[in-house]
Amino acid sequence: MFIFPDLSNELHAMQDAGIVISPWLAGLSSEGRLDAALYSDMSTRAREFAHVHWTEEERVRVLHHFPSPDRIPQIAVHEIVASIAVYLAHERTGQLEVDEPLIEEAMKLVTQFVSEHSFGTLLQLYMLVTSWENQNALKHFGEIPERNFVLGGWHRPWVDYSLGEELMFAALLGNVEVIERDGHRFVRLTEEGEQALERASEMLEQAGYFKQRLQFLRISQFNLYDAYEQVADEIWPDTPQQRKDFVQFVGMHPGMRVLELGCANGPLTFEGGLANAVQPGGHIIAVDPSTGMLARARTKQRSLQIDWIEFMYGRAESLPFDAGSFDMVLGTGFLHFTDLKLSIPEMTRLVRPGGVIGSWHPLKADLNVPFFREWFAPLFELAAKRAERPRDFLIEPNTVNEALVMAGLIRVEERSMPVITMFHDPVKVVNHFIRGVGWFSEELAPLPWKAREDLIEDLIERGKYVCERFTPEERVFRFPGQAIRAKRPIR
Ligand SMILES: C[S@@+](CC[C@H](N)C(=O)[O-])C[C@H]1O[C@@H](n2cnc3c(N)ncnc32)[C@H](O)[C@@H]1O
């Protein structure tokens, strides 16, 4: 279709240029990521930008004889700039709130892209992504009541404008039709629309856009993970003692300089005994990418009056410290969230020769047990469509040991420390694992928003039923777990 010709090269160029088209990161309703003044200022700037760059010449080049949509160009600029800014904020600070300098930076990236590739190209990419969201939802639901479609309630609830113009445009292109039944109007895909969806899916898949989209969806639910501390002790009742055992296992001594990774709100740092083990003569830098967690760790620190710890934003993959700065680099329950190819070499770089790195983490488990299979059956079914088992992203046994040896560490020692997990409270379990940590997010990502939400609600209901059918003992799951320590050679 001429409006969406093969845009593969442009999709790659967009990713290389740091252009993020992820409207769900950008909406005003998205938990105050942009405050109202900044949002309205941006709208004005987006309108002006579109006015200057969306020329008649561009319209003819991209749309041929079709009339120009009235508001889509300015909405596109607004949502692209905002989603770049939110993405950058998250990358750099772990927060989703955006300030003016970030908007400036995002605006510059868009200006640069437009000067190299044209405004029409940017608009085509935006329309490719948003019409994929529309068509994918129509395909999933078969049809959507027109009113719901226009309000975006089933598939783009973050919009605060009408999707009427997008609907009109898709109908003009022949991709959708509106039918009337019993006095109600419904939107559905035409055969041409189905083909357009297939072509768009192929193009987006090949250009790696769906991988990016999964990452953006995870970011957008990122802060939900903050509820961790409210569920941790209930879901993993054995972990408080296990963290203490881990501190013993790694051999912490008074006076050590320690880097703790993935510290969250400090269950290892404080209750687990890390701070006590190094004592006031030592020093701990504790990092985490969740600023909400760090804020609560600092509150705990103040109430305990412990001043030999610094809490900082940071990810295990790359940290701003000199090589060999620490006697020990360690953490609990964080390694499976990191990119091991980067985090293990970084941990190795940061520990001094003769120093120790340590981690306690859960390992991949066979989730095909009766209560789990029954509870999470819809996810198994979704995965089966791809001829796969649901992915849980936990680490395979031996992967860490091998990575440590590859990184040049010696005396790799390990102890089995299972992660005993209670599947008792369906709301907490589902909110934590599915919404928060993002288990099975690959299965859920292709679903339109409402289908995702309905499925999550369904999982909570199924959980209630499963909790009646299976005894509490049958619902305890022992994830294999590994405590590991290794030494950096002196030379
Ligand atoms: C399950 S919690 C574990 C927290 C705590 N250490 C404990 O023992 O309970 C995982 C923590 O890892 C953090 N995290 C996620 N990705 C990370 C990364 N790339 N580098 C470091 N920490 C990360 C999360 O923000 C979260 O606070």
Image (cartoon, rainbow, N blue to C red):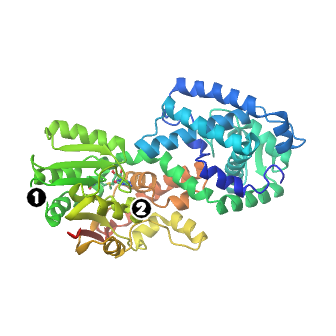
State the quadrant of the N terminus. Answer: bottom right
The amino acid at mark 2 is Asp
Crowd class of label 1 (few under 14; some 14 to 19; many from 20; radius 10 Å): some
Q: Quadrant of residue 205?
A: bottom right
Residue 159 visible: no
Front residue (pair 295, 143): 295
Left/right of residue 463 with respect to residue 114 in the rendered view: left
Q: Are marks 2 and 1 in contact (CB under 8 Å)?
A: no
Please name the residue shown 74% across and 61% down the image. 198
Q: CA distance from mark 2 to mark 1?
A: 29 Å
Q: Position of residue 194 (x, y in %)?
A: 77, 58
Ligand 1 has an atom within 8 Å of the beta carbon of the residue at disc 2: yes
Q: Position of residue 206 (x, y in %)?
A: 66, 63
Q: Which mark is residue 227?
A: none
Ligand 1 has an atom within 8 Å of the beta carbon of the residue at disc 1: no
Q: Which mark is residue 253?
A: 1
Please name the residue shown 40% across and 51% down the image. 427
Residue 318, compared with residue 104, is above or below; it is below
Q: Which mark is residue 339?
A: 2
The amino acid at mark 1 is His
Please name the residue shown 10% across and 53% down the image. 255
Is disc 1 placed on a helix, strand or loop? loop
Count how many numbered circles sit on residues in the image. Answer: 2
Front residue (pair 432, 284): 284
